[in-house]
Amino acid sequence: MRYQDGVVYGYTLTYHQFGGLRADGTFSIDEGTGTSGLGTMGFSNNAYVVNQFANCELVSDASGNPVEVYYVNQQSATADRYQAAVDQQSAKPEAAWVDFTPDNVAAMLSDTAGGAAPPTSATPEPSACETCCSFQKTHPLRKS
């Protein structure tokens, strides 16, 4: 979720697309197609973008045999360099989680948490949450 210009946006990612969230916002990625890695998330006006900073891809060599290729910071890397990045990621502290309740959402968006709290009477339009249908129906700030 992210809060911008008075609107709460929710994005749906699978467990494999967004796992092992760390306190610094980095996370692990497993695309299930022979590609895995580490990344951060950025946002445009209405979408999210995953920026991979380390990844391993399963590709075929000239003979059609599977070969793993590695990248760290968008540069070709050895398996050892990639594993060092994975180990460094694993050593980072995990993200703190709180229950998804109206009070906790308001607290996370408050000025003391670094955001601007939305008014308690805020009623976001359904389109603000269109990427997550269940979120539309249960939005904690939505007054039905």
Image (spheres, grey):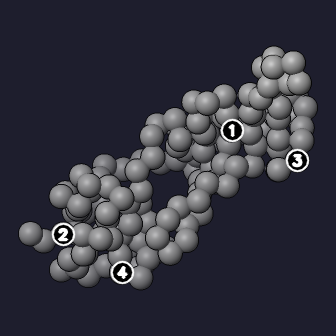
**Mark 3 belongs to which amino acid?**
Gln
* Viewer can see residue 11: yes
Q: Which comes sooner in the sequence, label 4 or label 3?
A: 4
Within 10 angstroms of label 1, few (less than 14), some, or many (20 or more) residues?
Answer: many
Do callouts 4 and 2 mark residues in contact (Cβ within 8 Å)?
Answer: no
**Mark 1 belongs to which amino acid?**
Gly
**Mark 4 belongs to which amino acid?**
Gly
Quarter of the figure with the N terminus: bottom left
Left or right: 3 as drawn, with respect to 63:
left
Do callouts 1 and 4 mark residues in contact (Cβ within 8 Å)?
Answer: no
Q: Which comes sooner in the sequence, label 4 or label 2?
A: 4
Q: Which comes sooner in the sequence, label 3 or label 1?
A: 1
Q: Which comes sooner in the sequence, label 1 or label 4?
A: 4
* Viewer can see residue 113: no
User: Which residue is disc 1 drawn over?
Assistant: 37
State the SS at label 4: loop
Compute the Cα span from label 4 to label 3: 39 Å
Left or right: 51 as drawn, with respect to 112:
right
Do callouts 2 and 3 mark residues in contact (Cβ within 8 Å)?
Answer: no
Compute the Cα span from label 2 to label 3: 45 Å
User: Which residue is disc 4 drawn over?
Assistant: 6
Residue at the location (22% across, 79% down)?
Answer: 122
Q: Position of residue 68 (x, y in %)?
A: 80, 26
The image quarter containing residue 64 is: top right
Front residue (pair 9, 106): 9
Compute the Cα span from label 4 to label 2: 13 Å
